[in-house]
Image: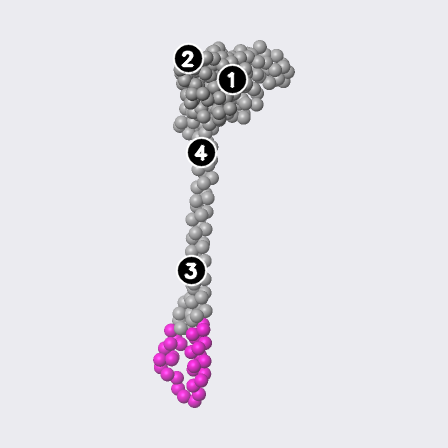
Amino acid sequence: MAAPAPATTGDLLRVDPLELRFPFELKKQISCSMQLSNHTDDYIAFKVKTTSPKKYSVRPNTGVVLPRSTCDVVVTMQAQREAPPDMQCKDKFLVQSVVAPAGITVKDVTGDMPPSPVPEESEEGSPPRASESENGDGPSGGFTRALRERIEPQDKSTEAGALVSKLTEEKNSAIQQNHRLRQELDLVRQEISKRRGGGFSFIVVIIVALIGAILGYLMKS
């Protein structure tokens, strides 16, 4: 059973062989190796990724290839309970590489160091494609759309919350104003009640009428 040739992120490393071949046997681990060759005068850091990380073990999956030297990488397929259709393997591998500082060691290599032009490995085994990542139609684009659809309702709910808060403040202000008017009306009534045996002043009548009109308007709103 053969897997497609590992792709690289550039011409820094040469990958050999061009196709990984696994002599398939049921319920048995199968290993094959590939060699990474550095024909430059630089230290090259690398990372090996696969579309089926649960199915394969890659050792080492990160490392450093010294100038003008090689590094062997062993890819082990975990024991499978059933054979793939037509004995054809559709899993893919990607070798990412980047020029590293001179003297760097394997311990200094991090997962973020090599560039990542494609989405991270898929747990479902579906091979990612760079074109899907770029035009937004693939898994990465779907995640972006889902994230955007998740954010937009939050923005709308934030606007609605601000509107409710503003209306609440206006309502509280109207209630306070209504309370003040009631107090003023009570004072006027008290003043009127103090006047015994005399007619009402025309000004007092107007004030009472205005306060009553304002109070009625606020109660309706």
Whether residue 166 is situated above or below residue 136 in the rendered picture: below
Occupied quadrant, residue 196: bottom left
Check the picture and name the quadrant holding the C terminus: bottom left
Q: Which residue is labeled 3 in the image?
A: 170
Q: Which residue is labeled 2 in the image?
A: 39
Badge 4 marks a residue whose secondary structure is helix
Whether residue 87 is situated above or below residue 146 in the rendered picture: above
Identity, as a three-letter code, of the amino acid under mark 3: Glu
Q: Which residues are magenta?
A: 182-210
Q: Are marks 2 and 1 in contact (CB under 8 Å)?
A: no
Q: If you read the primary sequence from the N terminus, does the residue marked by circle 2 or circle 1 appear first?
A: 2
Residue drawn where x is 59% and y is 12% of the image: 24
Residue drawn where x is 45% and y is 43% of the image: 153
Q: Which residue is labeled 1 in the image?
A: 90
> In the rendering, at what x and y percent does residue 115 appear?
43, 25
> In the rendering, at what x and y percent does residue 210 appear?
38, 73
Name the one closer to the observer, 137 or 130.
Answer: 130
Marks 3 and 1, how far apart at CA: 64 Å
Identity, as a three-letter code, of the amino acid under mark 2: His
Q: Which residue is labeled 4 in the image?
A: 144
On whether residue 209 falls in the magenta region, the answer is yes
Marks 2 and 1, how far apart at CA: 30 Å
Residue drawn where x is 54% and y is 16% of the image: 75
Name the one closer to the observer, 37 or 146.
Answer: 37
Q: If you read the primary sequence from the N terminus, does the residue marked by circle 3 or circle 4 appear first?
A: 4
Q: If you read the primary sequence from the N terminus, does the residue marked by circle 2 or circle 3 appear first?
A: 2
